[in-house]
Image (tube, rainbow, N blue to C red):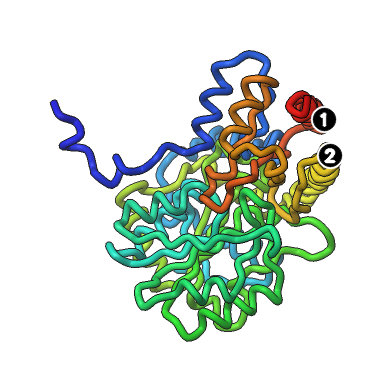
Amino acid sequence: MDYSSVLSERVQELSPSGIRKFFDLASEMEGVISLGVGEPDFKTPYSIRRAGIESLEKGRTWYTANAGLKELKVEITNYLRRRFELDYNPADEVIVTVGGSEAIDLAIRSLINPGDEVLVPEPCFVAYAPIAALTGAKVVPIPTREEDDFKLCAAALKERITDKSKLLIFPYPNNPTGAVMRQKELEEIAGVLRDTNIIVLSDEIYAELTYGERRHVSIASIEGMRERTILVSGFSKAYAMTGWRIGYVCAPAPITAQMLKVHQYAIMCSPTTSQYAAVTAMRSCDDEIRKMADEYDVRRRLCVGEFNRIGLHCFPAEGAFYVFPSIKSTGMSSDEFCQELLYSKRVAVVPGTAFGAAGEGYVRVSYSYSVSYLVNAIKRIEEFLQERKG
């Protein structure tokens, strides 16, 4: 059989993730220190695990409503009000999803027609552009620069808007750079969008992982933006619940009504056990996520300081759990740097180009690992740099 003739052309055109490439290489080697995976090294807090176990012991193993447990949707809205001053109606403005990834897919598939333009600030999470491409959209990258703290500038956004622009991906706090958009910058972006029909997909999965005295501000909280914002978030990062596969999306009811159609046919509902566990996470784990965030902050400051010390200039990330050091001083491309480092020193990091062309000259380093693990990895990277200098 000629499989190329029966497989979707759009799927065949997609490139494998650059993250996956280096993960696969590292998995075949012994003694590798991997700083490539964006996954907390903490266990899911005990009270959350206990809630999941109790739901199984009570035989709660049936389907839930398509949009999710009513109890969980109420807790999600209570949490967003308590933490970020956002108000959503749990009855028709919240859908519980299989991780934040499904929420992103739902939003894009529900909005985009072939030929629509999707604006994507880069560097960014690897999934946005491929999902948009599968819908037949034209992906319009908007490069961000270290000189601007890797933030989306209002002027750059305005330059790329056309009459076909339909959706703006808004990935802050940012993976891979750690950039955070503050109130003033959000208001400038809102000023550009107000006279358009562009919808914003705001991926706020790292909202609880911002550092310093200023908390995360959602673009949905800016005047005039709630009605055009789809807020995506979940439990994987802040609550250390990656394997539970539980997330959510909040948006105006006319949008969630259409998203729910896709969700109910493709998924039915999110995992029931995970939903019961997530109720406890939302209701009583604010202190737990603060403790984890405080530990990430220790690691963040360590990594920024050490990379600058060994000669790889490092932007002082303000959110998520990644740093994005520049490797331009080595004269190597991002891909070359990562391959040589992996083979010579058994340290795995991710080339910046995995997150878009604007990532060239940088590598992503996850600090979701213990301090001792990070110190050992950075020691090997320093040795690699010294050996190259000869």
x, y percentage for residue 32?
Answer: 66, 20
- The residue under the point 19% across, 31% down is 3
User: Which residue lies most toward the front here?
Assistant: 390
Is residue 380 found left or right of 236 in the rendered image?
right
x, y percentage for residue 77?
Answer: 59, 65
| Badge count | 2
> Identity of the amino acid at label 1?
Val
Could you say whether the residue bearing mark 2 is in a helix, strand or loop? Answer: helix
Q: Are marks 1 and 2 in contact (CB under 8 Å)?
A: yes
Could you say whether the residue bearing mark 1 is in a helix, strand or loop? Answer: helix
> Identity of the amino acid at label 2?
Glu
x, y percentage for residue 56?
Answer: 53, 34
- The residue under the point 53% across, 43% down is 354
Question: To which residue does mark 1 refer?
Answer: 375
**Label 1 or label 2, whichever comes before in sequence order:** 2
- Residue 295 visible in this rendered orientation of the protein: no
Q: Which mark is residue 152?
A: none
x, y percentage for residue 240?
Answer: 66, 41
Does residue 53 sit above or below 25 in this rendering?
below
- The residue under the point 45% across, 46% down is 270
